[in-house]
Image (spheres, rainbow, N blue to C red):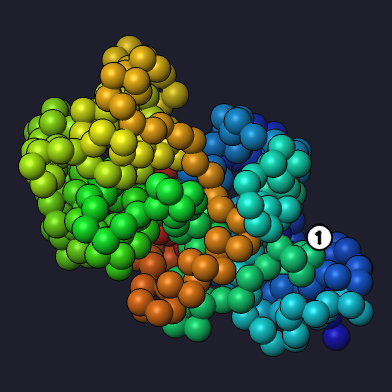
Amino acid sequence: MAPQTTKQWVVEGRNGFDSLKLNQQAELPKLGDHDILVKFHAVSLNYRNLIIPKGQYPFPAKEYVVPCSDGAGTVEATGARVTRFKIGDKVVTLLTQGHLAGSLTPADISTGLGGALDGTLRQHGVFDESGLVAMPSNLDWQEASTLSCAALTAWSALYKFDSQSLRPGQTVLTQGTGGVSLFVLQFAKAAGATVISTTSSKEKEELLKKHGADHVLNYKSDPNWGESAKKLTPEGAGVDHIVEVGGPTTMKQSLKAIKIDGVINIIGFLGGAKSEDQPSFLECLTNICTVKGGFAGSRQEFEAMNRAIEAKNIKPVVDKVFGFEEAKEAYQYTWDQKHFGKLTIKIE
């Protein structure tokens, strides 16, 4: 018999991680015809999860929301007209529940899990069948729980538009060692690209090389890493794809590294939302490149990504696993940027 209640975390207020509250007996809604009850086994954290309780998230986020968008679990019950899945299937959540294919719309943005809609940091959750995808067969629960946001954002950055998609032999630049950057590294190497990565740590430099980075630049000892990256490319022409996670604080160097007609995908602002050294829009013209904002992709892209993950046996990098009751500690660990790759929360 399906449970009537579940344990779940909620965000009450915008007072930092103290806003996270554990509800021991939250009521579960009744299943609609196309609904699925998911028993979660693992959840992963992303930067967006950290800034919602801090009141810094630029997209819709409701009060008392169940946080997190990424979760992997088992189908425990289905509505009368569900056709996509059956009881016992292993599934992963789609971050933007309404974004099934094509370009993102304003309406889609209002369907983000863990922001506008209740997310995954709970033992059970009810979702429309259209907002779930089959879990890759080569991954375990912790690995699969990392895909919805970081992996799909990385995939979308590299493959969103056919005319600008990553090609074998091209050069990709990644920044740091967070989840998106590690997925970009893995996807790019699987596609036959050369990868240049940046970090500030000697220890992480070795880890990046272990996971396939062809070149690693230390942005602390080499503040002009953009120029250095360009010199590493064939004929010094520049980098084809840059996945920009630092924001205003790193954009100047990204513009120095980019190739003519190259693409800079801005998907975050880990270095802060403002910088005195922030480049102007004119520099996009003078460098003759495309600069665009990025977001997690559609369900169609998710399914394509999962096929690649299975075909190439790509394994997400899970650095540390926390218990369900340790959610606040997991948030703080991620905020302190102690992780390499992804951090997950085990749900039992």
Could you tell me which quadrant the C terminus lies in?
Answer: bottom right
Question: Which amino acid, mark 1?
Answer: Ala
Q: Is residue 330 visible?
A: no
183 with respect to 323 (left or right): left
53 with respect to 159 (left or right): right
Question: Label 1: how many residues lie within 10 Å, few (<14), some (14-19) or many (20+)?
Answer: some
Q: Residue furthest front?
A: 163
Q: Secondary structure at mark 1?
A: strand
Identify the residue under disc 1.
26
Q: Residue at x 34, y 20 (%)?
A: 285
Q: Is residue 291 above or below residue 190?
A: above
Percent coordinates x, y for residue 324 in the rendering = 57, 64
Q: Which is more toward the observer, 117 or 25?
A: 117
Percent coordinates x, y for residue 127 in the rendering = 77, 64
Could you tell me which quadrant the N terminus lies in?
Answer: bottom right
Instruction: Count the labels in the image.
Output: 1
Q: Which is more toward the observer, 80 or 329?
A: 80
299 with respect to 76 (left or right): left
Q: Residue at x 89, y 77 (%)?
A: 81
Percent coordinates x, y for residue 118 in the rendering = 73, 52
Q: Which is more toward the observer, 36 or 324?
A: 36
Q: Residue at x 76, y 69 (%)?
A: 129
Percent coordinates x, y for residue 176 in the rendering = 28, 45
Q: Residue furthest top?
A: 276
Q: Is residue 128 above or below residue 334?
A: below
Q: Is residue 134 above or below residue 253?
A: below
Q: Is residue 63 visible?
A: yes
Q: Residue at x 51, y 78 (%)?
A: 136
